[in-house]
Image (spheres, coloured by chain):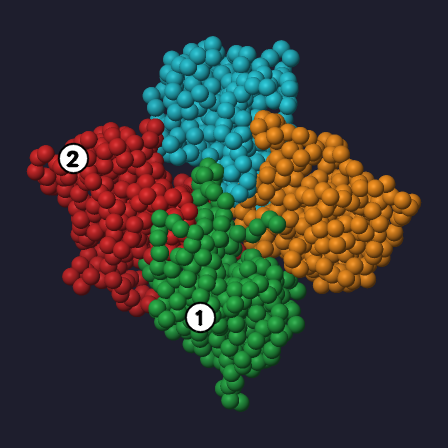
Chain colours: A green, B red, C cyan, D orange
Amino acid sequence: MYPVTPSRTPSSPMATHHFEPSHYHTTISPHEPVLRIADGDTVMTSTVDAMGKDARDKPVTPRGNPQTGPFYIEGAEPDETLVVRLDRIFPNRPIGYTASIVAANVVDPAYARKLPERELFEWRIDNQSGTATLLKPETKLGSLTIPLAPMLGCFGVAPSDGQAISTATSAEHGGNMDYRGLVAGVTVYFPVFVPGALLHVGDGHAAQGDGEIVGTGIEISMEVEFTVRVIKGKRIFWPRGENAEYIFTVGNARPLDQAVQHATTEMLRWLNEDYGLDLIDASLLLGQCFEYDRVTSSIRRTR
Amino acid sequence: MYPVTPSRTPSSPMATHHFEPSHYHTTISPHEPVLRIADGDTVMTSTVDAMGKDARDKPVTPRGNPQTGPFYIEGAEPDETLVVRLDRIFPNRPIGYTASIVAANVVDPAYARKLPERELFEWRIDNQSGTATLLKPETKLGSLTIPLAPMLGCFGVAPSDGQAISTATSAEHGGNMDYRGLVAGVTVYFPVFVPGALLHVGDGHAAQGDGEIVGTGIEISMEVEFTVRVIKGKRIFWPRGENAEYIFTVGNARPLDQAVQHATTEMLRWLNEDYGLDLIDASLLLGQCFEYDRVTSSIRRTR
Amino acid sequence: MYPVTPSRTPSSPMATHHFEPSHYHTTISPHEPVLRIADGDTVMTSTVDAMGKDARDKPVTPRGNPQTGPFYIEGAEPDETLVVRLDRIFPNRPIGYTASIVAANVVDPAYARKLPERELFEWRIDNQSGTATLLKPETKLGSLTIPLAPMLGCFGVAPSDGQAISTATSAEHGGNMDYRGLVAGVTVYFPVFVPGALLHVGDGHAAQGDGEIVGTGIEISMEVEFTVRVIKGKRIFWPRGENAEYIFTVGNARPLDQAVQHATTEMLRWLNEDYGLDLIDASLLLGQCFEYDRVTSSIRRTR
Amino acid sequence: MYPVTPSRTPSSPMATHHFEPSHYHTTISPHEPVLRIADGDTVMTSTVDAMGKDARDKPVTPRGNPQTGPFYIEGAEPDETLVVRLDRIFPNRPIGYTASIVAANVVDPAYARKLPERELFEWRIDNQSGTATLLKPETKLGSLTIPLAPMLGCFGVAPSDGQAISTATSAEHGGNMDYRGLVAGVTVYFPVFVPGALLHVGDGHAAQGDGEIVGTGIEISMEVEFTVRVIKGKRIFWPRGENAEYIFTVGNARPLDQAVQHATTEMLRWLNEDYGLDLIDASLLLGQCFEYDRVTSSIRRTR
């Protein structure tokens, strides 16, 4: 629906890069790029899970949503827009992990006293059947089986002003959005803050409920394939996205009321700039049709 | 899914009451009941719109989500649960109204300065085709037509401790929840605070986006039919509901983070008490499956 | 500093009323007035403590910040301003009570799990020495002795629109503000919503820290003396006050950021209307001189 | 009051370093240190104003609370505590600047529409008389003169995990706290996250109201003198401070309710660890004696 009109038809054939990561980052920042790619190129790569464990379920890097990348996209300049189509995202190992208890900040403060300590639970992931099955320890849920809905919890571009933003949190640049809508088939738009945009990807979830209220999705390593485009001269302020049914904006902030403000404002801008609707047109439309998902619950933790 | 097992099989045949309101309330409170009904009874009645206008589009009572009722349900006692099945809700006039501009509190504070003053827009409502069509003034949206999704914005039971809570706001007793999920076919559960529960109904919307971000749905008078049951000895803390697909809880509070806390806590209680899941079972389930709608944006306005 | 210019010089000598309460209210609302007084009159009365216990430490009414009153002030009309000078507030018994543990909502959610259950502690109150001394149970604090600073936690006028607002909470009408600045010598201004204003007073604290973070001050019954004036034709939106050093405004809301917005906006209005400062003048002044106390932490509790 | 017992008596005489900055940072981060100093040493240096202008009122670095430093303190290791005594802070030029209008986020959302655009106003700073006087443009305030109360708005130590945190915001490491209590004579305690702590200082204000509600204090370049100590083996979680009258903790977060939670939790820890009070002792004390200043309103701005 959003008219993606990259500034140029790629002059050379679009390449597909196979990239095997050898190191990871737990901040999103202007780190040294691992690969330079062109507007229109596709990357096939892999991500470790949030605890830093790879496809063999072995720890290869410290925990904390370690990121693969960054990828330098030629031609992406500050105040322009990077388009990332998530082509494929699928688990590359049969075991995923979730925490066992809701976070203290999503229940009433007095109720928080009832919460037991967090433990890790294992899920069996089956790409064939497209399911995740609760494995152990044993619970009353038995072999609870839910559909796979593989997504990236944390990805984004290097932020402005030389910031290195922890992969525990999120902002205008993306980051730890933990939004279950960010699945294969979705196109995501990021504001560009530094030359080359510097895209980072990581924190795959085999499935996740809204708001990641236990503090994890089903954490797992992933194979990830994505294709990038640049929209020259187009400036946006917050991540945007589109899938077959929706256009959407992502407001990453605490408190939730502020996230609502960011997402709503960005949607008004979008409807104004690309659909020609003024504030009254857009309000009439959104007022009766807008839907809010819970965008993020990312909790900034004290060490 | 929720096992509705009223305390008794109604001993007498269940009655259907046709009730024509003659006055309305803009607080939800232990007002004098307009009708006493039995557990299992059905009521067919009507509601005026948020501005106090009736089926002829004529003002009959002051503005502010005026409520029809309250209805006294025999056998409902404090610390028990009132079950309200919304049997039918449909507009009884062809004209609805919306405000024209998003509320200042759902956009970035600096962006709020761009918002023009609110005006009222008219929509044509057609029960036959099941549509609402933007009528006037003219906008770039032309004859924007959307599906009808008739709902009650404000309804609930008399609150605790002799409170009279404005129909501009919402709390444990329900009230101005403005939740688009409260449509015909849904069963709603309310905590009971006073003998007879004292159910109030009003504030019909022909359709509404999440969060009622322009401060209105398509405001309209309604025909409403509902059936009540009492669950003796069952205590809940926040409104609950179920439809063909979901069970849900409603947390009415500001800020949104607190609404999330109330709704999540109430769902944990529900899963524990009626589904036998402990906190870990429930967390494992919700963590990967929970969905959050934006429950309410009800803005408490300074006069 | 604020130019109190009541509409008229009282035509009759100002009276002092001694009022002995016989019943109390746990909502602030248009209850039947207990006394009608004139502009300029003084009332000497007493209040029970938050638990409903009187000067003999005996329960005489249900708990929950029971209010003495309401007092009908002749000549006070909606959209005008009631001026209440707190002449004297002092404990009328030697025993006060506090809760023993901070509320779960003022500590980090994860930390809340460490909090033990609330108990009541006793303090000895000595008007002669002007001190409160921790009595029992025994703690490492020994006979902790702090200065008396008697204040009213909950008082205000009947709210708009027929609301009956619980004395557990606060809003434009005042209510459970729990602001330690509301001591003898202070003049408080309330917006008037109903004829006669209907002033309620209660919830005395012998002393209290900012934000009443344990959920209580030192709860105690009080002798209270106040004098009322009416400012005809003057409309305010939130409570205001002044003491020997400050003028101040009181924003009662959750979250705290919204309380800040209400209080700041009301101060801007005040500086504009009564001191002739435009928004830039007022901003320059407040920007470098404004002080924020934490106005309220009143927690709305689920039953 | 807080028993500062550094790990060792400095074995060598404590040095005083005169440091003239040649470059500045707009993130707080593990930047290359400009100077290595010992436990017990004193530094005399200068800071530019928030706009990057120096003692001659000339721009020497880009705007955004540019920081002098970082200073590497020998012996400071992660999970230990850095003590910074602010010995002297005074303006080194006669001109300061403030913005002219309150930020949109500190007034009611609907009221925000009345706010004019921000401009810069000039103040004359006089160290001799200890005053700041509003200079121009002209306003109804005339030559408003207020006492100097020089403070540092933004300072702190390198954060954890390789983060580079913008000087527009604040967190556990300090940063843009904009707390008017951080004046000469105060001792500040920071958690240490990286070897050497890496102290940054900047953003001097000749005076500032609570919450920096216009988005600026009186912005000015400063001479700053501070002395550092290390408390070996002592771990804290949020900045702490003490002056002649108070011990205090600083919770840097949005929303304000979360800042309250951080600051209260840190104070409970402090009272427990260093004063031997358990949670009940501490609650009894804080409940009746705690004072909250408004710590910060730092607004994270979209570019």
Instruction: Give whichever of C141, B33 is nearer the camera.
Output: C141
* Mark 1, other Cα within 10 Å: few <14 / some 14–19 / many ≥20: many
Q: Are marks 1 and 2 in contact (CB under 8 Å)?
A: no
Residue B7 position in % (x across, y down): 19, 35
Residue type at mark 1 is Phe
Disc assigned to residue B299: none
The residue to which callout 2 is attached is B8
Q: Is residue D265 visible?
A: yes
Residue C201 position in % (x across, y down): 45, 22
Rendered-image quadrant of the C terminus of chain D: bottom right
Q: Quadrant of residue C130?
A: top right
Residue in the picture at 30% in, 68% down: B142
- As drawn, C29 above or below B266: above
Residue B120 position in % (x across, y down): 32, 55
- As drawn, C199 above or below A280: above
The residue to which callout 1 is attached is A90
Q: Is residue C71 visible?
A: no
Residue in the picture at 48% in, 72% down: A223
Label 1, secondary structure: give it: strand
